[in-house]
Structure formats: C-alpha cells, structure tokens
Image: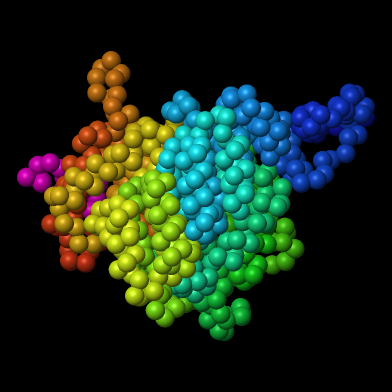
Amino acid sequence: MTGDFSPEQKRYLEGFVSGLGAVRASRGLPGFGGGAAASVVAEPTGPDAASLKAMARTEAAGKKLEAAEIAKREELGLDSYARMKQAAKDGVYPKGPDVLRWRYHGLFFVGPTQDSYMVRLRIPNGVMTHWQFAGVADIAEAHGGPYAHVTTRANLQIREVPATDGIKVLEKLVALGLTCKGSGADNIRNVTGTPTAGIDPQELIDTRVYASEWHNHILNTREMYGLPRKFNVAYDGAGLIAALEDTNDIGFQAVEVKDGFGAEPGVWFRLALGGITGHKDLARDTGVVVKPEDATRVSDAIVRVFIDHGDRTDRKKARLKYVLDAFGFEKFLAEVEIKLGEKLTRVPTEAVAVRPVSDRQAHIGVHKQKQDGLNWIGVVLPVGKMTVEQMRGIAKISRDLGDGDIRLTVWQNFLISGVKDENVELVKLALEALGLGISATAVRAGLVACTGSEGCKFAASPTKRNAEEIAAHCDGRIAVDQPVNIHLTGCHHSCAQHYIGDIGLIGQRVPVSDEGDTVDGYNVCVGGGFGADGAIGREIFQNIKAEDAPFLVERMLKGWMDNRSAPDESFAAFTRRFETPQLVSLFSAEAAE
C-alpha cells in the first residue's frame, strides 16, 4: 500500500506513526505493530490531536523537531504528576526533559543557580483575597525562603523550595483556591488585567470577569496545552494603571466604538497581536474589535491557529510574532475566522474614540476610587520582594481596613483597595510599621527588575541587587521631577521587559582581561515606551560593568534634566530627538563634569 505514496507522503506517515507510538508508549498502551498496520492507522483524536498533527507535519516536511517537542510527544507535562510525587518522596529534582514537564505544574528547578524549586502561581487579573495572601505567606515560611516575589505578570513566586516539598506547596495552594497549573513551560501564562478593575474612575470596562473566564477556560481545556512555546494574554480596561497589554501575544484594549461605522456603538475590545518585547516587537492593532463577551472564544481560536502553525523546530522562533510575520495579518485572521466559524468585526481607525491616558504614578500612593469615600493605596515594594511577616501584615490591613482584596500589578507592587477616607492615614502608619511605604522617588517608582543571576540560571547579572544600587546612588544625587522607568533584565528572555523602559539594561558578561575573565554587567537601551507612547528602545551602550551602572544612569538622568527642550519633556521623548552618537556624547563622563 505504501508503494502508492510519494516520498513526502511516506515521510509524513512515518513521522505521524512515530508520534502516535510515542504517545501510546508514554501512557502504557501497546504499540501498533508494524508493516501494514502502521499504514492504515487512523489520525489521532482527542485533545492532543492538533499538536501531534503539527509535529507530524513538521517531520513530513523533512524538518527536525526541537528536543522539547519530542519530549512533549513522549509525555506531556500534564501527565507527569504521579512521577512528580514519586520524585518528591525520593527527594530528587527532575533531570533532562522532566525539567520542562515539571514546569507544566508550576515547579521550576532553578539549579545550578539554586538547588531548589521556584513555584509560580496563577492569579487571574492579579487579584487575591487577604486570606489567600496570608496563606501563601504560611506556605512560603513552611516550605521555602521566608519571602515571595511579585512578578511582572502581576503574579507571585515562592522560592527556595526543596525537592521533598514541591508537591506539598502545589497541593496546599489548591487548598487555598489557587493553582500553578500551566504557569510555566509551553503554556498560556498568568492572565493579566487592569489592576484597578471595577474601582477605577476612568475605566471603560471591568476586566476581572474576562480575565477570570479565560483563566478557567485554559485550566479546563487540555487543547490549550499543546502550544509550541509560551503565550501571553492581557486585558486593559483603559484604567489609570497600564496593564502593558501591548507586550502580550494577545492584547485586548477596551475602546469606545462610535456610531455609524458598521459595528454596534459602545465598549468593545480592540484586538492587538504579536507583542514580544524581548524580540523587539509590540502587539500591533489588527483593525478588529471584539465584543467583550466573545473575548474567550476569539482567544481560543487564535491559540488553536498558533498550535497548528507555530514553529516546532526552533524555540527562538516558536512565538506568535513569527507566525504573523510569515502569514501577514490578513491570512492569519482568515485562519482565526475558520476556527471561529464566523467573521471577525473590523472597523476603521476613526471609528474608535481616543482611549483615556494612563497615569505612570497611579500604582503607588493614595488614589480615589469611583466608589464615593473609598481609595486604593499603592504600596512600594523594593524590586518586588516582601517577607512573610510583611505579607501577613498586608493581609491584616486589607481585611481590617480595606475591602479584603490585594491587587498585584505588572510594576512589581500591589494595591490595597476599598480603604475609607477616614482610614487612609491609619493604613499608611500600619504599612510603615511593616517597613513599607506608599511614596517613592521617580527612580524607585519606575524601577523593575527580574530575578537575576542570584535565582535564575539564564541571567548574566544580579539584577535585583544592581537595581537597588542604582536607586540608592541616584536618589541621593539627582532629583527627577517626572516619571522614569528603569528596567533591568538578566537575559534575552526579557522578563523585566527592558526594551520598553525609558532606560533598559540587559545583563551581559563583561570581559575584563585577555584571558577571558568576565564580570557582571549590562548593555543599555533608551527610549522605550508602552501604550500611546509605545516604542522599542535602542541600544546605545555595551559592556557596562555593573559597578559602573549607577554612575551611568545618574549621568543619563542629569543629561536629560539639563538638556530638555521643555520642563515637561519626558525622558523617552528627549532621547528620541537625538541620534545615538549624540546621546552617547551627552551621557559621557566628560559631559557630566
């Protein structure tokens, strides 16, 4: 029978059968036998079918699957829980492909940097109850380092968890109504949204219901775990605090559609696609608007197209951006419409009203809610870290003096919402007793740093420590009178999104001798932005030693303050007026003297 097939068809069949056999073996099922039986095997069915077919098509085209794809075909991480429990009993960490598989459940083995797990949660729209927050503190104290980190996806991470305790952490989190499922590996990551959703006086829509619906759809739809690489989705309700939706694979932007343009007037989500700042791209407007109640269906269809067509041979290119680059937007959207079974709604640019502008300082300090007499209070966290004692105190303040919610932000801090006017000063004093404040200098307010080399094997520099050094140095030497974002990221994964910072630093090993010796250091970008001011920063300095970074940042800020065209000219606008050699000269040590 196979003699009637072309060489390409034969390769397809061989790859197809090989994939099915690997899946059956991983589930303890007998193989298909050989010869004639293999030539008549039916196509895969069930929730893993789309990803298995995509792998088979890749091999049929004569291409080699990336190692992670082979590992997922042999055993998808979702099916590894029993082996994870046994590893915990044995007190051993995962090896080889199991490192990837364990991440499907939120367990990240971070060796050799630390001989421990990092555990990452899923917190849709970043909103937690006070009792969940306190419960995470208890878990961190019992099973990890006595602290937690707020991430740039409005999420929490627990670190320093030993091999024996990973499963205990996961199961205790479930008991709190929290989960880590799909928070790492080739999955749809934590769903972000406007942190002031439902309380923001300028928002167009409360994003919490849509972020939660998508979160639960992911958790309960196995097909959503067949991706070739990670995937990010965010909802921005046009509130005062930016959700950075334009840095995501899918960005839903709340907009008001005017009458007379073929779409029902009112609030819709504008669809933006392809954001991945580590690859120097922000999400681009598709011209499509989506009814809020249809956002989950549209996301599902987009992800399914990505599963079918994402690159499975090169993990560096296995992101939605590269499918869009290859297809073009119209072809991609046509594929989405096939999955949906209906046409998407398109409107011209002029059909959409100008969106309200975000406030770059609204994530810290006291701000009036749209509910009379109530406020949210944004609390400063030095590079996103808080101790378990602080967490318990925060939970108590939220319970006693707020509405019981704690809202994490993509700016690595949190808000306490529902604080009555008469209790604002009491909350401030209670936070001060915990060693926390609600105000910060412009430098500290916009300071973002990833985990860095002290906790991540990919990072080239200790970003959190260096960020603190930059802030401490600059605060005593220059008074910045406008918001400025300084982002430090340790590697090309760009977890701290250095390309959208006014000043962005990406970790590098800086050579210091002819013998190959290196020290911590950075390459430096300027001029990035987000939202209406969105732009990818450009690199102007390379191989800056970490010990020299505070001095360079001071010179950059001083060069801006001394040479602005107007008192209100932002750092980003200032840098965009100059060519790179001019900026290098302005920011030089000689110019600062």
User: Could you say where residue 72 lies in the image, as x and y percent from the top left?
Assistant: 68, 34
User: Could you say where residue 474 lies in the image, as x and y percent from the top left?
Assistant: 19, 48
Vertical order, 104 against 113 (above or below): below
Q: Is residue 430 left or right of residue 281?
A: left
On whether residue 587 falls in the magenta region, the answer is yes
Does residue 535 appear anywhere in the picture?
Answer: no
Asked which quadrant contains residue 456, the reply is top left
Asked which quadrant contains residue 529, the reply is bottom left
User: Could you say where residue 275 lies in the image, as x and y percent from the top left?
Assistant: 49, 53
Asked which quadrant contains residue 184, the reply is top right
Q: Nearer the viewer, residue 575 or 465?
A: 465
Q: Nearer the viewer, residue 107 or 427?
A: 427
Q: Which residue is at a point 42% across and 46% down the rendered structure image?
A: 388
Vertical order, 39 against 436 (above or below): above
Vertical order, 133 against 521 (above or below): below
Q: Main secondary structure of the magenta part?
A: helix
Query: In which quadrant is the N terminus drawn?
Result: top right
Q: Is residue 130 left or right of residue 223?
A: left
The magenta segment is: 576-593
Query: In which quadrant is the C terminus drawn?
Result: top left
**Residue found farthest to the left:** 593
Q: Is residue 21 left or right of residue 319?
A: right
Q: Please give the count of numbered marks on the rendered protein.
A: 0
Q: Which residue is at a point 71% across and 47% down the rendered structure image?
A: 222
**Residue found farthest to the bottom:** 260
On whether residue 381 falls in the magenta region, the answer is no
Does residue 560 appear anywhere in the picture?
Answer: yes
Q: Which residue is at a point 52% across and 56% down the rendered structure image?
A: 131
